[in-house]
Image: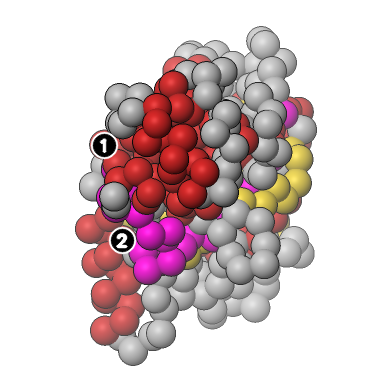
Amino acid sequence: MASLLLSFAPNATAMGLPAYAPRRPAADPVVVRCSLSGAVDGGGARSADDYQATLRTLNSKGVRRAPRKSLGQNYMLNSSVNEQLSSIAEIKEGDIVLEIGPGTGSLTNVLVDAGATVLAVEKDPRMAALVRDRFQGVDRLTVLEEDFMKCHFHSYMSHLLESKKSMGTDLQYAKVVSNIPFNISTDIIKRLLPLGDIFSDVVLLLQDETALRLVDPSLRTSEYRPINIFVNFYSGKMFAEYAEYQFKVERKNFFPQPNVDAAVVTFKLKRTADYPEVGTIKGFFSMVNSAFNAKRKMLRKSLQHFCTSLEIEEALKNAGLPVTSRPEELSLDDFVRLHNLLTLR
Ligand SMILES: C[S@@+](CC[C@H](N)C(=O)[O-])C[C@H]1O[C@@H](n2cnc3c(N)ncnc32)[C@H](O)[C@@H]1O
């Protein structure tokens, strides 16, 4: 596989990717299937970016540049994983979807096919050009060539939602469906989860280890970290987990093959009104981070720059917690109670 390098001509058809073809052309009852090698045949159910076709195309396109490791470029070779991402997010006609890192556009293809309006944010200019070229003439797709971490997508999504509402639809929220670069997945999650004002669901393909760490790690384990408090603060649904591990995706499904497996995780975002009540969110997370910075220390020591040991012990007692508590022993609710007792004195 190492010798299988991808030529990134900034042109989809030059790379052998199919131009976008709708699943069911309105005027033509014959279903058209495009493979990644560019061949088009009748009789298939839909345009598919499948494993063999992808490998054939990548092999046949010669070697120019390798996918960029720094951009986490591991492309999905299995179209059924893309289908599952879309179906877990329940993407349907009229939905608005944010996709981070469309790459070759294989997931984009499934989302557009499902009838969604898609905003795709791609940092690599070659891949952005490729996706634009592939979906030429598809007015339900906009490709922003930007770094997602710096991109002002919020106003764009709000605008899309407003225009859907003005057309009389009852769509309230957009969704995020993405196969994201593993190296910045925590930063992406931190950026997305507080956006319950525009997103209802976030469905991500993540490194398996990250997925397992995010989804409900037990108290008193080394896996329990501030990101878990963060996930629980901003996402969750009544009577279910905050984040749900859906299924594992083995490394062999990607090109180039990473050294790790992946997994699909879903987050249901809370509305602002459903966040736990704290003095300020910034102050709350500042306390949580301080507590975990000295994970082995008892809170009465690690939080001393907020107040005295005696005051912390008093607050712990009033919160119904042992005075000897360490951060990994506290749930989100425990942290909220402790924070409010310390700050709302
Ligand atoms: C794991 S690949 C996934 C590609 C495609 N979605 C797929 O499933 O095959 C990650 C994609 O994210 C892009 N990317 C990496 N960092 C990014 C960033 N900061 N902002 C936007 N896109 C980024 C990469 O160029 C690449 O296309």
The response on whether ligand 1 sits within 8 Å of label 2 is no
- Left-right relation of 182 to 49: left
Q: Amino acid at mark 2?
A: Met
Residues at marks 2 and 1 touching, judged by CB atoms closer than 8 Å? no
The local secondary structure at tag 2 comes to helix
Q: Amino acid at mark 1?
A: Lys
Q: How many marks?
A: 2
Residue at image position (33%, 89%) is 168
Q: Position of residue 259 (x, y in %)?
A: 69, 18
The question of residue 165 being in magenta is answered with no
Give, as a single range, the part of the protein colored magenta: 261-282
Q: In this picture, is 67 found above or below 264? A: above
Q: In terms of image quadrants, where is residue 155? A: bottom left
Query: What is the residue that sits farthest to the top in this orientation?
Result: 3
Q: Position of residue 100 (x, y in %)?
A: 44, 43
Residue at image position (67%, 67%) is 239
Query: Which mark, residue 157?
Result: 2
Instruction: Identify the image quadrant of the N terminus.
Output: top right
The answer to whether any part of residue 313 appears in the image is yes
Residue at image position (46%, 35%) is 313
Which residue has dot 1 on it? 150
Residue sitting nearer the eye, 256 or 159:
159
